[in-house]
Image (spheres, rainbow, N blue to C red):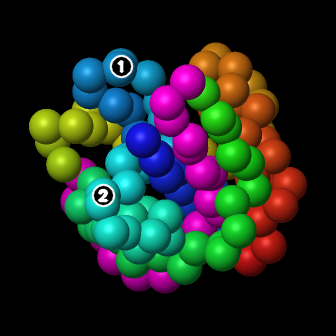
C-alpha cells in the first residue's frame, strides 16, 4: 500500500489537522489509489480533505517504509483556497509557526518531520 503526506506551507506557517479518529495533529495525507501517481494522489487528498490548491515539490523529502506500506512525505506550498475541512475526518486545523512546532507535544516523528520540512521549505 502506498500513502502520501503533504507538509503544506502558507506564509511560513505549516498546516496540521487534528485527525478525528486518531485524535492527533497530523499533516494532510491519504492512500494512493490504483492508477494514480503519488503527486496526483496528494493533490486529490489535499483538495478533498481541506479544499486547498497546492504546488508540490516533485521529490519526497522523506520516505518511510513499514511492513506493507510506503509513505512518501512531500513539501507543498498553498497556492489558493480557503480551508473547508471534511468534518467526518478532521476535528480542527491550525497553521503552526516553526516556534510552535518546536514547543509542541506532537507525536515525535511528526514533530521531527515538521521541523525538517521547515528547514527545507523555500517560499
Q: Residue 39 location, x and y as percent? A: 49, 71
Q: Residue 33 location, x and y as percent? A: 30, 58
Using the numbered discs, state the Cα–Cα distance from disc 2 to disc 1 in whole angstroms. 25 Å
- Find out whether residue 74 is within the magenta segment: yes
Discs 2, 1 touching: Cβ within 8 Å: no
- Find out whether residue 49 is within the magenta segment: no
Badge 2: residue crowd in 10 Å (few <14, some 14–19, many ≥20): few
Circle 2 — which element? loop
The residue that mark 1 highlights is 23
Q: How many marks?
A: 2
Residue 66 sits in quarter: top right
Q: Quick one: 22 or 118, which is closer to the camera?
A: 22
2 or 1: mark nearer the eye: 2
Residue at horizontal 46%, vertical 46%? 3
The residue that mark 2 highlights is 33
Q: Quick one: 74 or 72, which is closer to the camera?
A: 72
Placement of 111 over or under 120, stated as above or below: above
Q: Main secondary structure of the magenta part?
A: strand
Residue at horizontal 26%, vertical 27%? 20
Circle 1 — which element? loop
| Earlier sequence position, callout 2 versus callout 1 | 1
Q: Is residue 77 visible?
A: no
Residue that protrudes farthest toward the right in the picture: 119
Q: Is residue 22 visible?
A: yes
Residue at horizontal 66%, vertical 75%? 58
Q: Magenta region: which residues? A: 67-85
Residue at horizontal 30%, vertical 60%? 34
Q: Residue 16 location, x and y as percent? A: 49, 43
Q: Quick one: 93 or 40, which is closer to the camera?
A: 40
Amino acid at each position: 500500500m502506498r500513502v502520501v503526506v503533504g507538509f503544506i506551507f502558507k506564509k511560513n506557517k505549516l498546516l496540521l489537522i487534528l485527525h478525528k479518529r486518531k485524535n492527533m495533529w497530523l499533516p494532510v495525507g491519504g492512500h494512493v489509489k490504483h492508477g494514480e501517481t503519488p503527486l496526483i494522489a496528494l493533490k486529490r487528498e489535499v483538495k478533498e480533505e481541506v479544499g486547498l490548491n497546492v504546488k508540490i515539490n516533485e521529490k519526497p523529502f522523506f520516505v518511510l517504509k513499514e511492513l506493507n506500506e510506503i509513505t512518501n512525505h512531500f513539501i507543498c506550498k498553498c497556492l489558493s483556497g480557503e480551508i473547508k475541512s471534511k468534518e467526518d475526518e478532521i476535528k480542527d486545523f491550525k497553521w503552526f509557526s516553526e516556534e510552535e512546532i518546536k514547543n509542541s507535544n506532537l507525536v515525535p516523528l511528526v514533530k521531527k518531520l515538521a521541523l525538517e520540512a521547515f528547514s527545507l521549505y523555500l517560499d
